[in-house]
Image (cartoon, helix red, strand yellow):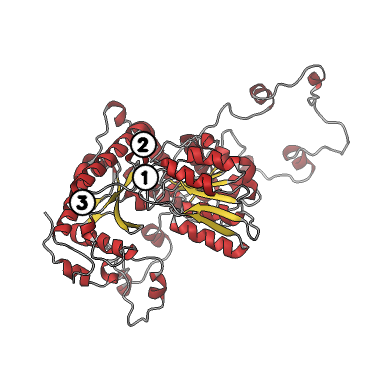
């Protein structure tokens, strides 16, 4: 089934050739000499404009037609009522002065204060009766529409109505129909970067091109209502008030906004667990270096015995008066579901505000932010929900919003929570608008059906792998949902003097380069685990491929030192 390539060839390759690039490599690459630097290839053909080596470019109309998306002519929007056109002035000369004043202006012949020239309301009825606020007041005294009317989209978008009459087929057919993923790759690492729903990506691309057809009209006149509507839809999906949720590019931006906005005094504590995401730990360390606050990080021992182990740890170690407690709803490296329903009330009892990194939660879990009780919560829509990359949200309780500012301060600053975050300068906002197509898909297919398939497949795959390798899970089965941490056979790495990140990455790279399996290997407290993900495009054969590959490597007695 697999290519018969010598393992030693893979091991002898430099880490640069067969490992992953990380952000730290940027320094090395940017400082490389021109003689040594080799620019990366692009995975598809790109324009080179070589035609202009032999011919001159024609600027103007031909250039516009050939190289830009701008409309041939601008069509201004209609007004909802008849407006004057002043065509009489085409055939006769306007008479300026008194006649012009009388014909075209409201100015009185002379100023006579303070009378008004018409009857005005006096509201004397409220001398004898009380005003009824709410719907009756709205109907009687305001021009507001009876209900919110979402903005139209300027082109047709998919509605997935076919699933009203037929059931969706998860697995290979779903992958082919709704995702761009390569058929040749065994892709069981959805948790890393997600995988976009094909229809949502197409809508985002349509918005990009539509924006370029008349940028000012779209950005100045149409964009904000579209973004607001996406925020309203997402707020309903996670069950919170629309005024409590703002769209952001990713969870990292949201976490930075909250942590950098909060004021810490020297010696104040920030509580977190050892399973907190690495990038978030770096953010906390950076903030503490600025403020002289301190991090209290408590170790979670693996394998977990159950959620009570985590609850007892927090109960024993969290001190009243702690400035902030930070938890991952689903820790990235060890993807068990954190028991937040019990942890958050415990924090509240001790007067500790709570920030939740829910990067993996939206889509994986049914979120009810109103009931959860976190002070701040953020999650990515481009992971398990399958929105285009660069789409996430930040939730903050209303009474806390005033003090939270985005990382980029722009025109909306001082205008309210939504105003501060909704405009982050000129950039591509299409992912936010295309989010509605993703929500349409979830609502038609039904979130409970999607989660049932994902969770059942994860459970079945984990059971199969542990039996095949005679290993165990890093936590009880009922603590996992869309991802699971399965221990690898010890024979795969037993001769290694140390088991760490480098050990894990080498095995992960072997799985990718030799077997074309995309799955992460995690080093946890001296043991190696594989973190499997399941989504609606996966099927059991994906995990059987992984099982066979690891079994083959064990039989070959592959270790770090066998070369």
Q: Secondary structure at mark 2?
A: helix
Asked whether disc 1 touches disc 3, contact meaning CB atoms under 8 Å apart, the reply is no
**Residue underneath mark 2:** 441
Label 3: element kind? helix
Q: Which residue is more in the foreground, 235 or 78?
A: 235
Considering the image in quadrants, where does the C terminus appear? bottom left
Toward the top, the furthest residue is 128
Of 484 and 415, the residue lying toward us: 484
User: What residue is at 43 percent from the left and 40 percent from the top?
Assistant: 436
Which residue is tagged 3?
546
Residue 386 is marked as 1
- Residue 336's quadrant in the figure? top left
Task: Give coordinates of residue 396: x percent, y percent.
Answer: 57, 44
Q: Nearer the viewer, residue 240 or 492?
A: 492
Q: Nearer the viewer, mark 1 or mark 2?
A: 1
Disc 2 and disc 3: Cα gap in Å? 30 Å
- The answer to whether residue 538 is visible is no
Q: Is residue 528 left or right of residue 265?
A: left
Image location (x, y in percent) of residue 527: 31, 57
Q: Are marks 1 and 2 in contact (CB under 8 Å)?
A: yes
Neighbourhood count class around disc 1 (C-alpha, 10 Å): few under 14, some 14–19, many 20 upward = many
Q: As drawn, is 98 to the left or to the right of 140?
A: right
Frontmost of labels 1 and 3 is 3
């Amino acid at each position: 089934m697999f290519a018969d390539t010598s393992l030693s060839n893979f091991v002898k390759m430099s880490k640069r050739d067969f490992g992953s690039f990380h952000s730290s490599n940027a320094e090395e690459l940017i400082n490389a000499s021109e003689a040594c630097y080799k620019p990366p290839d692009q995975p598809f053909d790109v324009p080179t404009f070589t035609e202009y080596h032999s011919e001159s470019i024609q600027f103007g109309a031909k250039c516009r037609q050939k190289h830009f998306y701008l409309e041939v002519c601008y069509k201004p929007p209609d007004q909802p009522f008849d407006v004057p056109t002043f065509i009489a002035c085409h055939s006769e000369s306007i008479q300026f002065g008194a006649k012009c004043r009388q014909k075209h202006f409201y100015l009185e012949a002379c100023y006579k204060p303070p009378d008004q020239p018409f009857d005005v309301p006096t509201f004397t009825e409220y001398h004898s009766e009380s005003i009824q606020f709410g719907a009756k007041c709205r109907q009687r005294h305001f021009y507001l529409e009876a209900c919110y009317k979402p903005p139209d989209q300027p082109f047709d978008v998919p509605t997935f109505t076919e699933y009203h009459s037929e059931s969706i087929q998860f697995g290979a057919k779903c992958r082919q129909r709704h995702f761009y993923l390569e058929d040749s790759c065994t892709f069981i690492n959805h948790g890393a970067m997600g995988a976009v729903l094909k229809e949502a990506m197409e809508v985002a691309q349509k918005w990009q091109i539509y924006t370029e057809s008349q940028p000012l009209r779209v950005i100045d006149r149409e964009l904000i209502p579209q973004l607001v509507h996406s925020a309203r839809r997402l707020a309903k999906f996670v069950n919170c008030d629309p005024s409590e949720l703002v769209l952001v590019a990713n969870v990292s931006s949201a976490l930075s906004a909250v942590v950098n906005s909060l004021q810490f005094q020297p010696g104040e504590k920030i509580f977190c667990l050892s399973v907190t995401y690495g990038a978030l730990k770096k953010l906390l360390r950076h903030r503490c270096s600025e403020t002289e606050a301190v991090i209290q990080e408590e170790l979670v021992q693996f394998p977990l015995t159950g959620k009570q182990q985590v609850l007892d740890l927090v109960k024993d170690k969290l001190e009243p008066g702690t400035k902030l407690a930070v938890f991952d709803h689903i820790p990235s490296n060890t993807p068990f579901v954190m028991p937040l329903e019990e942890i958050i009330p415990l924090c509240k009892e001790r007067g500790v505000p709570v920030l939740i990194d829910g990067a993996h939660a939206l889509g994986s879990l049914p979120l009810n932010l109103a009931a959860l009780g976190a002070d701040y919560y953020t999650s990515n829509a481009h992971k398990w929900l399958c929105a285009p990359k660069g789409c996430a949200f930040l939730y903050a309780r209303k009474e806390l919003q005033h003090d939270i500012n985005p990382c980029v301060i722009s025109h909306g600053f001082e205008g309210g929570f939504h105003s501060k975050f909704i405009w982050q300068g000129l950039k591509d906002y299409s992912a936010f608008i295309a989010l509605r197509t993703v929500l349409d898909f979830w609502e038609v297919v039904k979130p409970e059906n999607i989660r049932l398939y994902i969770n059942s497949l994860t459970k079945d795959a984990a059971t199969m792998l542990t039996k095949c390798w005679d290993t165990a899970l890093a936590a009880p089965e009922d603590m996992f949902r869309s991802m699971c941490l399965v221990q690898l056979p010890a024979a795969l790495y037993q001769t290694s003097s140390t088991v760490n990140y480098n050990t894990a990455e080498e095995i992960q790279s072997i799985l990718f380069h030799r077997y074309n399996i995309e799955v992460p290997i995690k080093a946890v407290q001296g043991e190696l685990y594989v973190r499997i993900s399941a989504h609606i495009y996966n099927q059991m054969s994906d995990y059987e491929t992984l099982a066979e590959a690891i079994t083959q490597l064990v039989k070959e007695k592959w270790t770090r030192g066998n070369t």
